Each structure stands twice: as C-alpha cells, then as structure tokens.
Image (spheres, helix red, strand yellow):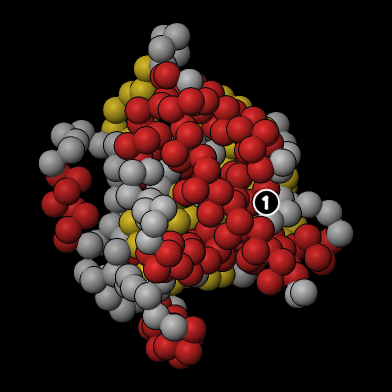
Amino acid sequence: MSQTTEARRSFERLLEWTIRVEYPAAATFLPEAGREAFLDYYRKLPGLLDPKAFARYRRGMWRSEAGWVARWIMQRHEATGRRPRVLDAGSGFGTYAMLFAAVGAEVVGADLRPDRLEAAESRLVFCRQSLGLDLPVRSTRADLTAAWDADYDLVWVYNALSHIEPLERFLDELRSHLTPGGVLVVGDINGSHPGHLRRLAGVREEVHQEYVAPDGQRSAYAVERTFPPGELRRELQSHGLRVVHHELYWGGSGVLAEPLYEGLLRPLQMQWWLGGRIARRQLMVAAVARPGA
C-alpha cells in the first residue's frame, strides 16, 4: 500500500467515524457548554443512510484544503522520519487537528474559547474509547498574536484568519516560528464572492471587536474580515511570506469522477486569478520568503 493510499484511508476512516459513531453519540459525551454549538455546526453532515452522499463528502474532503494538508503531512513524515509538528490556529472543536493527527502529525490546537477546547478534549477521549485511536493532539488556550513558545512545520488556519486581530502580529510570530521548509496553509472563503459578502453584511456591523471569555479574559477579535484572493496574497507577501500554492475552489469537487476532476476542474482551480466572483473558497500556501527573493 502506498503512503498516499494509507494516509487517505486513515483520513477517511476518521471522517466515517465522525458521521456514523461520534455525531449520533455527541449528546452523551460532550460537555454542555459546547454541545449545542457542535451539533448545530455539524448538522449538515451526510445522512447515515445515504452512502452516495457520504461518498461525495469523502471525495470532496480529500480534494479540499484539508486533503492538501494531509498529503503534505504524509510527504513530510516520509522525508524526515518524524511526525510533522502542526499548529491548528483557531482550532475550534478540533476536527482538523484530529484528521491531521490521524495521518501522521503531532498537533497543537490553539483557540481563545474554553468551551471549544473542552469539547475538543472530550472528542479525543471518545475517539480513544470508541475507535481505539489515541491521537497526538494537545489543546491549548492561546492568543496567537502574543509570543509563541514553539516552532512548527505547518500552521493551519481554517476559517480563522478572518478572526485574528491584529493579524500583523500573528504573521510576525508565524514567520519567526516556521521550521525550514515549513508552510502556512490558509483555507478560507473567497472574500470577493458576492453571496458571502451579502451574508456577512447581515451578521456583523463592525469588523474589529473584542472577545470576552466566561472568566473575563479579553482578547481583540475580528468578525469575518474578508480576503479577496489578490488581497490575501498581498497581505502575506507584505509580511515576509511568499505564496507557493494558491487555488480557488469552484464547487462540485466531490461529485466529479477522478478523470474529470484532475483533467478539467483542478487545472481551472489552479488559475487563482479567474473566477473571483464565482469561486466560493480558496486555498493558499505560503513559506518564509528568502532574503533577496
């Protein structure tokens, strides 16, 4: 079995466990503080009795930003002989931290919200009990605009760049703490999509706000700051990073058969400057810029 095939099986095994075992049982093991939000957030998972929907979901996830990271982890692990160290910045309920640990990473999940972190820890315990999988994930409450105390091979920011405030401090810390050959991977909405902009206009009045935790701890917080593809590139480049991969997701990736996806859709996605008002999501990968580059 190839390394890629093995990584994909581990990735998909955890997806299937979430749908068939974890989500139906969530009310029995998740702490009350995060339970309702977890159930609501994942309510659109494909139904247990719809194998075709699950097959589309599984293919789409492997072809998504998370699948790109899973393949990178596998390649890095194979090249170095050690588990890559991954920071899940804004880890929330810990879904991606668990997926990346399942394919070979050592993961630190960092978030401001204690209820999300508590839920993530409970999920790890339930995974160990019900699936027999002891995932190397550590959850920590952290403001990632403050000083970091460790280096990482990969920093994953999924739907969270829009909340980090001030973003400049986060990017400065990231640049200082990426290992040689390490990357920042951003998965986010396409901030120039009209539908996204209309939706966000109805859910927030001011971008720059403050998050107050239940214990009174205060942190600067942005509410859905949007990044059109060109603006995101300029933002990272202005802070000493160089973009090494950028693609836009047009939708339908889980539906298409492999030849159509690889021969038609994926080449189109790679033309990141196209479809700024059509594509719904974007994947951007950046590394520390070399002096003089």
Report the amino acid beneath label 1: Ala
Position of residue 107 in the picture relative to residue 239 (left or right): right
The residue at the point 24 percent across, 62 percent down is 192
Report which quarter residue 87 is drawn in: top right
Which element carries disc 1, helix, strand or loop? helix
Determine which residue is flagged by label 1: 102
Position of residue 29 in the picture relative to residue 70 (left or right): left
Report which quarter residue 126 is drawn in: top right
Location of residue 180 in the rendering, given as x and y in whole percent from the top left corner: 75, 57
Asked if residue 288 is positioned above or below residue 124 in the image, the reply reads below
Position of residue 287 in the picture relative to residue 36 (left or right): right
Location of residue 124 in the rendering, given as x and y in whole percent from the top left corner: 62, 34
Q: Which residue ends up furthest to the front in the rendered image?
A: 49
Placement of the N terminus among the 4 image quadrants: bottom right
What is the crowding at mark 1: few (fewer than 14 residues within 10 Å), some, or many (at least 20)? many
Position of residue 224 in the picture relative to residue 97 (left or right): left
Asked if residue 102 is positioned above or below residue 130 in the image, the reply reads below
The residue at the point 57 percent across, 27 percent down is 122
Does residue 248 appear in this view? no
The residue at the point 33 percent across, 56 percent down is 189
Report which quarter residue 203 is drawn in: top left
Placement of the C terminus among the 4 image quadrants: bottom right
